[in-house]
Image (cartoon, rainbow, N blue to C red):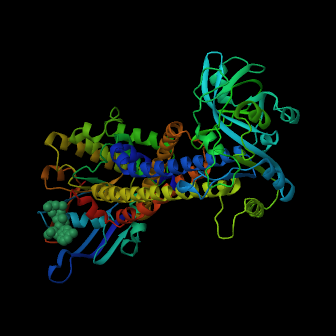
Amino acid sequence: MTDARLIELRKITKTYGVGDAAFQALRGIDLTIRRGDFVAVMGPSGSGKSTLMNLLGCLDTPTSGQYLYQGIAIELLDADQRSLLRRQELGFIFQGFNLLARTSALENVELPMIYRGIPRAERHHLAAEALASVGLPDKLRNTPAELSGGQQQRVAIARAIVTSPSTLFADEPTGNLDSKTTVEIMELLTRLNQERGITVILVTHEDDVATYARRTIHVRDGLIASDETKPS
Amino acid sequence: MLGNAFLIALREIRRNLMRAFLTVLGVIIGVAAVVTMVTLGQGTTMAVKSQISNLGSNLVMLRPGMGFGPRASSAGVPNFTQRDVEVLRDQVYGIEAIAPVKSSSLSTIYRQKARSTSVTGTTPSYFTINNWKIAEGRFFDENDLRDGNAVCVIGDTAKQELFGAEDPIGRLIRIGAPNSSSSSSSSSSKKSSTSSSSTSSSSSSSSSSSTSSDTVYSSTVQVIGVLAAKGQIGMGNQDDTIIMPLTALQRRLTGRTSSRDVSQIAISAKEGSDSERLVSDITALMRARRNLDRNKDNDFNVFDTRQIAETLSASTQMMTTLLAAVAGVSLLVGGIGIMNIMLVSVTERTREIGIRLAIGARAREVLLQFLVEAVTLSCIGGLVGIAVAFGLCVGISKLIQVPFIFDLKINVIAFLFSAAVGIVFGYTPARRAAALDPIDALRHE
Ligand SMILES: Nc1ncnc2c1ncn2[C@@H]1O[C@H](COP(=O)(O)OP(=O)(O)OP(=O)(O)O)[C@@H](O)[C@H]1O
Ligand SMILES: [Mg+2]
């Protein structure tokens, strides 16, 4: 890609509710994220981090402003088109893991490939490979209830990366994990960022987690308060 | 996309088998009820039809008696005469064959075995009129009739009871008054119900017969043939019968006490004749012969088996339809059950839907998933219901002695109906699932 700009936000606002109950969670965000970057979004609770992530992840649309993802104006897409964009380009990791209950790790990882229409054998192969790459080669048949928190988050990461997305969104991926497991997960994300060139954008409250990122953005009251990039 | 939806739906069903079972229980019961009702109903209709056609097609029967049904009475009503039979044969157009019938319940004895059986005296045309087939030996013929030979043809049940495995052809049986095991000529004066009705005419009758005794003599009769079994009809067993020449019955057993000793006239109509016309012609002629005034009711009944068959099968069919409709309501209730549980499961699975949407499922794919899930469930319910119905039909048809006729059509209809139930009642929950917002759904606890 000649254009290194993966994401461009211009004067993005997001207002929840209407009339007296209206609340402006984002109040004019300008942001550019380059391909292959590793960005940590920090800030106090209620500052608008999750709102921003949902917009970046095309799960939601801004109230005003412009959002270009790889040059595509997201605010012009309808729900189905955004679904297809998420399917093809984006991966998600959640604080609560969000795996399908009573469903094996393998089938959980297969899920996005079913929607992509990948044939059964290939799906199987890729899912097993993804689970191996997150360090769970022997847990294919286990259901979430049979896995530890860290292992569940690894399955979720495997599910997010199995389709080789260009961007990985993670809203507090280590929020439910202990410090040792947090290190493991962050090392995994760093490896994916470095070895496979996947752009990683994560929200965190912990400075330790943020140190893995190359760039750290602080959000406060719906605005970007600071934006620091480590010298490489 | 449909293939994917099917795959996902199957995985979802497998994920929660108990929920799936509860969801489809209503459909299983509904389909099983409908199919069982219709199958058994059709079996009953079929049984009624075949039994009536066993009686003989185009059969018209003449019996003395006033009125129909429970108020019917043959008491005090004169029987027919041989002459009636001849006149009917000569004067009514459309009669193929006609036979006088005189029936009595008499005791039959072979070696140590004695039992009471209906003994019929008639002419050879009786066999063709009533559609009897010979299994062994021969029918009696005109010569036997003319000479009054002491021969008889016995029904299958009579054969089993009297002879068991023994070959009855050529054997001699004793026939006499009911319950008189002794074989004296002065048999008891006990009256069998049929013989009393056929011979003792009351004073009001114009019959010439007086109150003369209906003494039954005893006689030895040779078995010359065995009839092919017809099976049960209604409450009576047609196969428990002994048929002999009318002349032999009159001369050797009942005596010729009166000329009015024909208790029934059996008539077969010509193929393609108008049976209503035939019945009215017979009625008119018999009224004239029995000197009935205009304002008097018939003192005899004319039964047309074709009419009876039509009436009976029409009423069983109506019954079947009614029962199937009631069962259909339970299928509808089953559909509402599906909708209910699917709606609950959409709420229960909101987070799952959120995950699917975040991963890139389109709303229509979620809709299709839930719809396919509902339809798959209801189709499985339909298939299981059909299997249950099959078992029930096999069991119940044995129990109530109705033939089990597997009807592909009703099974296919029931299956398609269950699929339709899935579509109709799965649509609302599916729409609700598809309308969810991914962020709200993911946040759902
Ligand atoms: N669906 C919604 N309707 C109304 N208000 C909302 C909605 N979602 C978020 N908000 C409000 O928007 C603001 C930003 O919320 P957001 O979830 O983005 O915060 P956050 O930075 O992620 O906080 P935390 O660190 O606690 O997760 C909050 O004040 C919140 O109450
Ligand atoms: Mg948040």
Q: Is residue A42 visible?
A: no
Residue B195 horizontal/vertical position (percent):
63, 40
Residue extending farthest to the bottom is: A19
Which is nearer the eye, A182 or A137? A137
Q: Is residue B203 visible?
A: yes
Residue B217 horizontal/vertical position (percent):
68, 28
- Left or right of B348: which side holds B32? right
- Left or right of B141: which side holds B178? left
Q: Quadrant of residue B154?
A: top right
Task: Name the residue: 27% across, 51% down.
Answer: A98
Q: How many marks?
A: 0
Residue extending farthest to the left is: A44
Residue A148 horizontal/vertical position (percent):
22, 38
Task: Name the residue: 17% across, 79% down.
Answer: A22
Q: Quadrant of the N terminus of chain A?
A: bottom left
Which is nearer the eye, B425 or B294? B294
Quick check: which quadrant has ligand 2? Answer: bottom left
Which is nearer the eye, B272 or A31? B272
Task: Name the residue: 70% across, 55% down.
Answer: B306
Relative vertical location of residue B203 with respect to residue B249 in this rendering, above or below: below
Which is nearer the eye, A228 or A72? A72
Relative vertical location of residue B360 with respect to residue B159 in this rendering, above or below: below
Q: Quadrant of residue A73?
A: bottom left
- Left or right of A87: which side holds A155? left
Residue B100 horizontal/vertical position (percent):
76, 45
Relative vertical location of residue B143 with respect to residue B201 in this rendering, above or below: above
